[in-house]
Each structure stands twice: as structure tokens, then as C-alpha cells.
Image (tube, rainbow, N blue to C red):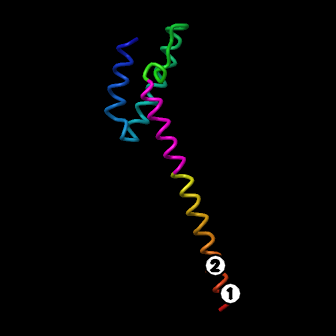
């Protein structure tokens, strides 16, 4: 189904930097994958295998989100430490 992969790639490239549109597009693609998988059987190839750029881009996005989450948790930990120090200072006064 090269035409299908071409359409998927075209729209993914168009919307890959717009998170809400990208997620809606990927959700729709995943839904249609179930139908195509049933239709093609053994000849089925997942779109992330047929278009490796999509898989690579999404792995990069997940890695960036993981780094942001780690930084946020580190900042929250620092804020908690600062709050504890403030509480100790208040008790001493």
C-alpha cells in the first residue's frame, strides 16, 4: 500500500511539530492500522516500519519528554529542600 504510506508521511511531515494535530493523526492512523492488518494478513507492514522517519521522530520526542520530566522532578525536589530550609529558619526564629 505505497499510496497509503505516502499519504501518512505527507500529513505527518506537515503536522509533526504541532502536538495536538500529530497525536490526533497518529490516533487515526493506529485505528486504521487494525483494519489494514486484518485486510492484508501476512503482507501487512506497520507504518512505522515502512516509514522509519516517523518512528525515529517519535523516539526523539519521547526522549525529550523524559528529560523534561526528569528536570521537573529535580526542580521539585530542590523546591522541597528549599521549603524545608525555610521551615527550619522559621522555627528557629
Q: Position of residue 91 (x, y in %)?
A: 68, 87
Q: Residue at x 64, y 85 (%)?
A: 89
The crowd level at tag 1 (other Cα within 10 Å; few <14, some 14-19, many 20+) is few
Q: Position of residue 11 (x, y in %)?
A: 33, 28
The one nearer the camera, 45 or 39, is 45
User: Which callout, 2 or 1, points to the residue nearer the camera?
Assistant: 2
Image quadrant containing the C terminus? bottom right
Q: Position of residue 2 (x, y in %)?
A: 38, 13
Q: Is residue 78 above or below residue 28?
A: below
Q: Residue at x 38, y 16 (%)?
A: 4
N-term mark: 2 or 1: 2
**Helix, strand or loop for disc 1:** helix
Q: Which residue is mark 2?
A: 85
Q: Which residue is mark 1?
A: 91
Extent of the magenta region: 52-67
Q: Residue at x 51, y 41 (%)?
A: 62
Q: Is residue 71 left or right of residue 90?
A: left
Amino acid at each position: 500500500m505505497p499510496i497509503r504510506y505516502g499519504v501518512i508521511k505527507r500529513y505527518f511531515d506537515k503536522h509533526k511539530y504541532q502536538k495536538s494535530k500529530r497525536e490526533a493523526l497518529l490516533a487515526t492512523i493506529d485505528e486504521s492500522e487494525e483494519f489494514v492488518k486484518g485486510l492484508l494478513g501476512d503482507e501487512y507492514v506497520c507504518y512505522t516500519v515502512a516509514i522509519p522517519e516517523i518512528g525515529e521522530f517519535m523516539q526523539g520526542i519521547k526522549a525529550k519528554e523524559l528529560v523534561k520530566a526528569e528536570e521537573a522532578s529535580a526542580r521539585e525536589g530542590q523546591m522541597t529542600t528549599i521549603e524545608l530550609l525555610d521551615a527550619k529558619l522559621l522555627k528557629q526564629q
